[in-house]
Image (spheres, rainbow, N blue to C red):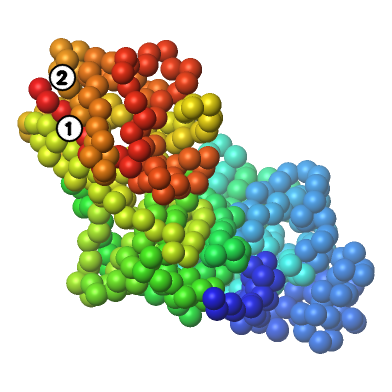
Amino acid sequence: MKRTIWMGGTALVAALALAVLAACVSQDKAVAQEEVPVDATSAATDGTSGATEAASSSGGAGAKGDRSFQDGSGWAVSLKGIREATLWQSYYEEAAKHASHYVEKKVDKKGVMTSYRGMPLRLAIAMIDGAEKDHAWLFDAALWAAGYDVTLVASDGYSVTFNTKDVAAEALIIADREDGTKIPPMVVGDAAKNLWVRDLAMIETSLAPSALVAAAASFSLDLDINGAKASWSLAELQRLPIYTEGRGAYTTSAGTRYEGVYGGVRLLDLLKTYADIAADDSVTFVAMDGYEMSYPGKTVLDQADGEWLLAFRLDGDWLPKDPGYIRTIKVGPKTPNIDGHLSVRMIKKIVVKQKDYVDFTLSLSGKMRFDLDRGTVQSCVSCHTRTVTFERKGVVAEYTGFPLWLLLGYVDDPEYAPHKQDTSIKTYMDDAADAGYAIKLSAIDGYSIILDSRDITRNDDIIVAMYRGGEKLPPEESPLVLVWDRAAKKIPEGIKNVKMLASVGATF
């Protein structure tokens, strides 16, 4: 087994975050110096770092640790952007002591020139337009010029939105005086009058991370590859060199096709970082809701029509929790389309075990015929999980599978089968089961029993099991076994344990 050692998830994120921040946050040193409080200018001789130190030591306006991000007094304007803050009246008035923080705008108000004095709007925006933590007044002029939406909301609910590309950064102020008289905070200035908002209560920008982004940021993928364990955030995965994007599709068991451009990491490359994958290895995906699906190594290795992705982006955005945050999909130039049960959603954990995969087929017959592959059977176990305590010859064990009667839904109707029709059509024919038909269960070695549908119908205590004690069945019972709960309310007369179950047939 190959192993690669790298930085842990948290350390890697921190290191990369610092690098990205240093490279991407656009700040103008001249602006930073201009916004230093007057009483701190003697210390601010070396750009933004000097301003930060001066403001922090002097208690002046500017440091992220100051009172603008704590409780203040008087009126308050809520600010929402890359981070959230509050512009308090007490903080506003302290900032207004400094010339560059308090300016005058003379505007035509119904034919009368009116004087407003206040703080430039850009200074409030500066508090929320970047990830920097050391200075409140570092305004990102480049980001403003690139364009984002700003919504101004009044206390009575009135709101107006503009794009920063359409309004000069110096055009608007948050005024607290009109012709020398104190007023509640008001946005006013050299812009369309619909942007003049009295009694300002909130400034919200499109820079604010969406709920989806915030939720995705807290998610981590866990790996257990032949005992080697690791955890990855989505941000870490996206920064890996094995991240790629491509078009893929899947079709649900009901026949609905979904297609899009998926972004994610190449599954095989991620797994091979920890171990070589063999055709008979089992690769099990465990979803956040407990659903499980296992692929044989040969499926992961098969890239003839495309490559498997652990996808967490779709058409440029993060996948939501359902069907994300991570799902399996195959992508390629010809848009490969896979069965829905192979596109596992809400993946939380991946477990790989060497030489552990056992393939099988369960044959069903009746008014219709089906051969269910291992994936379909495992999907049924995950969707209709039932665990029973079974006792045989004094040996007690827990078995997990799904109720036997669900299989009859595949063969009790000549035209329709479960998951293959719309909701107006029954998935199981209760009338036929109540009338009575024979159910024959046969093992690989030819052993069989016959049960009556009237003893089986809607009886969740009689199951087809795939696991024993939470692990795959032992060889003498694999791939499937018929068992029942020892405390079942109804145990059919003559029922016997069927090991190595291979087929289920109904005779009407």
Q: Position of residue 99 (x, y in %)?
A: 78, 70
Amino acid at dot 1: Gly
Identify the residue at image location x=22%, y=18%. Answer: 452
- Residue in front for this viewpoint, 42 or 190: 42
Residue 451's place in the image compared with 322, above or below, is above
Residue 318's place in the image compared with 387, above or below, is below
Confirm whether residue 345 shows in the render: yes
Confirm whether residue 206 shows in the render: no
Identify the residue at image location x=54%, y=52%. Answer: 215
Q: CA separation, marks 1 and 2?
A: 10 Å
**Residue 191: assigned label:** none
Q: Which residue is mark 1?
A: 505
- Residue in front for this viewpoint, 104 or 90: 90
Q: Which residue is mark 2?
A: 437
Answer with the quarter of the image where residue 422 lies. top left
Identify the residue at image location x=89%, y=81%. Answer: 43
